[in-house]
Amino acid sequence: MAHITALDRSDLGEFEVIFELTETVMGFVPRSMFTMGRNPALLQAFAQLAGTVLGPGEVDGGLKQLVGHVASTAAGCRYCQAHTASSAARSGVDAGKVEAVWSFETDDRFTAAERAALRLAHDASSVPNATTPAHFDDLAEHFSEEQIVEIVSVISLFGWLNRWNDTMATDLEDEPLAFGAEHLAASGWDAGKHATR
């Protein structure tokens, strides 16, 4: 159960355009945004950053979500694991590939480029950070420097979201909760403190 009560959407009318856009992309508005709304400047800044990082860019949206998923799993945030897995599937990544993401090093469904990005996501999200120059050498074989910045921005955004949602014990919404139960549970995922009670 969440530690801070989320506001109702109707209490945050000035953000309705942002909520509608988020709902179009994700299928729902994350409860974390309704908690952030207790500090309107924070919600505004977060929405702008998240829109920039996760919006259209040079890196495929499905890969961005897989990067966020691996980063969130390495950090232990079950809320963000469910969100990114569900969002990856919504972005066109086959659910079987999402389920196999922790076998990315050996699973034939993952390209060398995806492996380099996911390896970075895992090692950058570990504590302590385990990135080395070799990660960037591997990335440079497949991505421009602009694309690498985009990948690191996804990892960094989820670092913030992982801390926010795990600390707040944000309640999971129905869609990512159901996706996690169906596609991630076999790998040991459960909603934990993010289950709505």
Image (cartoon, helix red, strand yellow):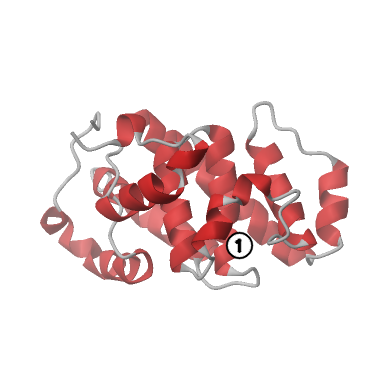
Left/right of residue 164 with respect to residue 102 in the rendered view: left
Up/down of 51 relative to 194, above or below: below
Residue 25 image-quadrant placement? bottom left
Q: Amino acid at mark 1?
A: Leu
Residue position for label 1: 63
Residues 175 and 106: in front is 106
Q: Position of residue 89 (x, y in %)?
A: 47, 63
Up/down of 126 relative to 39, above or below: above
Left/right of residue 55 with respect to residue 119 in the rendered view: left
Residue 90 image-quadrant placement? bottom left
The residue under the point 48% across, 69% down is 91
Left/right of residue 68 with respect to residue 18 in the rendered view: right
Q: Which secondary structure lies at badge 1?
A: helix
- In which quadrant will I find the C terminus? top left
Residues 149 and 136: in front is 136
The residue under the point 20% across, 42% down is 6
- In which quadrant will I find the N terminus? top left
Left/right of residue 130 with respect to residue 46 in the rendered view: right
